[in-house]
Image (cartoon, rainbow, N blue to C red):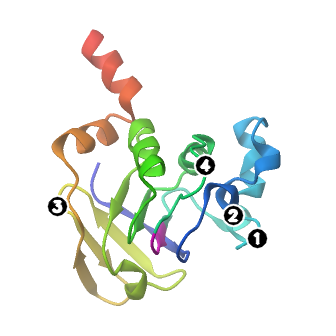
Amino acid sequence: MDPFKGDVWKFGDNVDTDVIVPGQYLDAPITEIFPHVFESINPAFAKEVKKGDIIVAGKNFGCGSSRENAPSALKEMGIGCIVAESFARIFFRNAVAIGLPVISCGDVSSRFQDHDHASVNLSKALIENTTRKTVTAANPLSEEMLRIIEKGGILNLLKEAKE
């Protein structure tokens, strides 16, 4: 599972689920949502994001409604990991539940710029900016959360336990 390596897409504070996935696309199939992810704050994102890229954000990432399609769209688009100074609680829980790697790190947004390259080691709770050659300690995830993320979500973990 570790480490996640990719180019950084940087976002600020209070990025809500309506910014991640605009409300008018809530009932659309997930692949039809992709072109609209972050369109109001970074129209280039959906066209240029690559599998494995990493989102670095400020405080309260994923605030707003409890829509599961926001973390689901990011996972299905191939986002490798999201590192934020803090997350809205329900977004964080939804992300872990579907196996989208997320981790908080107090001052991470000051350590990255768009298109820097990052390496994120969830199990060691280390965030590296390989462009600027800096390493920052993140808030460690519990063993249970790491296991859920490693298995690709709670449903996969439960299927495995049933077998």
- Give the CA distance from mark 2 to mark 1: 7 Å
Residue 51, quarter of picture: bottom right
Q: Nearer the viewer, residue 132 or 122?
A: 122
User: Please, what is the three-letter code of the amino acid marked with disc 3?
Assistant: Lys
**Amino acid of disc 2:** Phe
Marks 1 and 4: which is nearer the front? 4
Disc 4 and disc 2 in contact, CB within 8 angstroms: no
Left or right: residue 105 versus residue 27 is left
SS under mark 2: loop
Other residues around mark 1 within 10 Å, as few (<14) / some (14–19) / many (≥20): few
Q: Residue furthest top?
A: 163
Q: CA distance from mark 2 to mark 3?
A: 30 Å
* Residue type indicated by callout 4: Ser
Q: Which residue is mark 2?
A: 38
> Percent from the top left, x then y, of residue 13?
52, 75
Q: Earlier in the sequence, mark 3 or mark 4?
A: 4
Q: Are marks 2 and 3 in contact (CB under 8 Å)?
A: no
Magenta stretch encompasses residue 56: yes
Sequence-first disc among 3 and 1: 1
Q: Is residue 61 above or below residue 146?
A: below
**Numbered circle sitting on residue 143:** none
Q: Which residue is mark 1?
A: 43
Residue at x 54% of width, y 77% of height: 12
Residue 64 lies, in percent from the top left, at 59, 55
Please tell me whether mark 3 sits on a helix, a strand or a loop: loop
What range of the chain is rendered magenta?
A: 55-59
Please name the residue that numbered disc 4 is placed on: 65
Q: Which residue is mark 3?
A: 124
Residue occupying image coordinates x 26% and y 57% = 122
